Image (cartoon, rainbow, N blue to C red):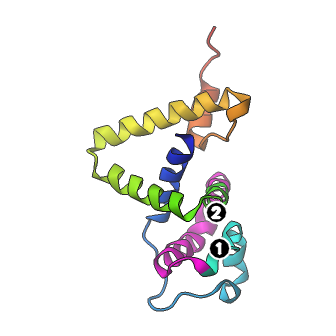
């Protein structure tokens, strides 16, 4: 379940509008040094991605310098996790995200809250340890320990 929910978040990141130029997208070797630095976790797969996905990723790379250091770290972490997913898991993540977009806002918030609670639960169990999203980590730190 955790891998599926993580994939859902990645699908959200990769569904953001891209501002890449129309036409054929560049191969890895044709990217600028700055683009390669941002997209480094995806270097091995880059040339195999469909153009639509490359355009979205180029949009992320373009916006990357304007992000806060915490947001930059989150993007890098999610790109690394996305790179470890199989093509089938990526496809499922995209489908899950599209289904999530169809939900009413109240239900989407409920899914998000369940996801954050699940991630906090994972953080408390060493065998399941994965980093929390920044907002959930800050919320967890702000709460006093429960007895």
Q: Residue 90's x, y, as percent?
A: 51, 61
**Magenta stretch: includes residue 73:** yes
Q: Quadrant of the C terminus?
A: top right
Q: Residue 112's x, y, as percent?
A: 43, 39
Residue drawn 61% across and 12% down?
A: 146
Query: What segment is highlighted magenta in the picture?
Result: 48-76
Question: Can residue 12 be seen by looking at this rendering?
Answer: no
Q: Residue furthest bottom?
A: 23
Q: Earlier in the sequence, mark 2 or mark 1?
A: 1
How far apart in space, not on screen, are marks 2 and 1 (Cα)?
8 Å
Question: Which residue lies under the disc numbered 1?
Answer: 45
Judging depth in this view, the residue of 2 and 32 nearest the camera is 2
Residue drawn 70% across and 36% down?
A: 129
Q: Name the element at disc 2.
A: helix
Q: Residue 65's x, y, as percent?
A: 63, 68
Q: Name the element at disc 1.
A: loop
Name the quadrant containing residue 136: top right
Question: Which residue lies under the disc numbered 2?
Answer: 83
**Magenta stretch: includes residue 10:** no
Task: Describe residue 15's horizontal placement relative to residue 57 as left or right.
Answer: left
Using a 10 Å C-alpha cutoff, classify the residue at mark 1 as few (fewer than 14 neighbours), some (14 to 19) or many (20 or more): few
Residue drawn 67% across and 41% down?
A: 131
Secondary structure predominantly adopted by residues drawn in magenta: helix
Judging depth in this view, the residue of 50 and 34 nearest the camera is 50
Residue drawn 51% across and 61% down?
A: 88
Q: Residue 132's x, y, as percent?
A: 62, 39
Mark 2 touches mark 1? (CB < 8 Å) = yes
């Amino acid at each position: 379940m955790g891998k599926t929910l993580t994939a859902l978040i990645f699908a959200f990141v990769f569904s953001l509008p891209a501002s890449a130029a129309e036409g054929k997208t560049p191969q890895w070797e044709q990217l600028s040094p700055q683009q390669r630095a941002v997209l480094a976790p995806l270097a091995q797969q880059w040339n195999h991605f469909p153009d639509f996905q490359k355009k979205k990723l180029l949009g992320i790379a373009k916006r990357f310098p304007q992000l806060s250091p915490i947001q930059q770290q989150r993007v890098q972490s999610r790109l690394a996790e996305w790179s470890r997913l199989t093509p089938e898991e990526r496809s499922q993540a995209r489908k899950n995200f599209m289904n999530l977009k169809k939900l009413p806002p109240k239900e989407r918030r409920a899914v998000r809250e369940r996801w954050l609670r699940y991630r906090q639960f994972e953080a408390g169990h060493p065998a399941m340890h994965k980093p929390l999203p920044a907002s959930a980590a800050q919320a967890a730190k702000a709460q006093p320990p429960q007895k």
